[in-house]
Amino acid sequence: MPENQRTDVPPTQDAAVDAVQRDVMETISPDGRPPEMSTQRREWKWFWLIGIPIGIGAVVVFLVALGPAAGLLGLIILAGMMVMAVPAWGAGLLRGQEERVARNVAEKVVRVDSRPPSSR
């Protein structure tokens, strides 16, 4: 059994937990609902198929056409861009924390809803 597969929630409840999690995220997160999984997959696919090769090609052309000094300048610019991206990384970490909280709430809601009526 894979490490990331949950054993305490039956597979039939996963869809219900996902739906409740999206509803909870819409309520608690300033960013609202997360994008649908198909949208995320499509965006990552385009990133890997188009973005990465174009980036690598641009770096190669930059180094070949302008030499090592330009490569050093490019690395300095890259470091500066990474520093400027720190707020976005922080927002991503907070979004992950919100998703974990929403998942825990959703699992509790689905678990309570799935109990037999006599035990409620």
Image: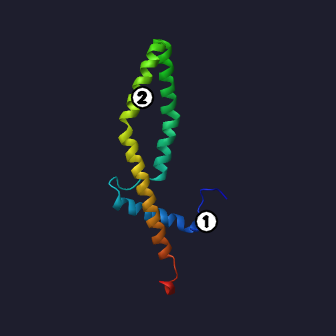
Nearest the camera: 28 or 49?
28
Q: Are marks 2 and 1 in contact (CB under 8 Å)?
A: no
Q: Position of residue 37 (x, y in %)?
A: 48, 52
Q: What SS does tag 1 mark?
A: loop
* Residue at left offset 35%, top offset 60%: 28
Name the amino acid, label 2.
Answer: Ala
Snapshot quadrant of residue 102: bottom left
Q: Mark 2 vs mark 1: which is more N-terminal?
A: 1
Q: Marks 2 and 1, how far apart in space?
A: 43 Å
State the scheme by which the image is colored: rainbow
Snapshot quadrant of residue 97: bottom left
Q: Position of residue 38 (x, y in %)?
A: 49, 50
Q: Name the mark on residue 85.
A: none
Q: Is residue 43 above or below residue 10?
A: above
* Residue at left offset 46%, top offset 48%: 39
Number of other residues with Cα within 10 Å of mark 2, as a class: few under 14, some 14 to 19, many 20 or more: few
Name the amino acid, label 1.
Answer: Thr
In the picture, measured across the screen, residue 82 lies left or right of residue 118, that is left
Q: Which residue is mark 1?
A: 7
* Residue at left offset 35%, top offset 55%: 32
Q: What SS does tag 2 mark?
A: helix
In the picture, measured across the screen, residue 85 lies left or right of residue 15, that is left
Number of other residues with Cα within 10 Å of mark 1, as a class: few under 14, some 14 to 19, many 20 or more: few
Q: Which residue is mark 2?
A: 79
Direction right: furthest residue: 1
In the picture, measured across the screen, residue 23 lies left or right of residue 7, that is left
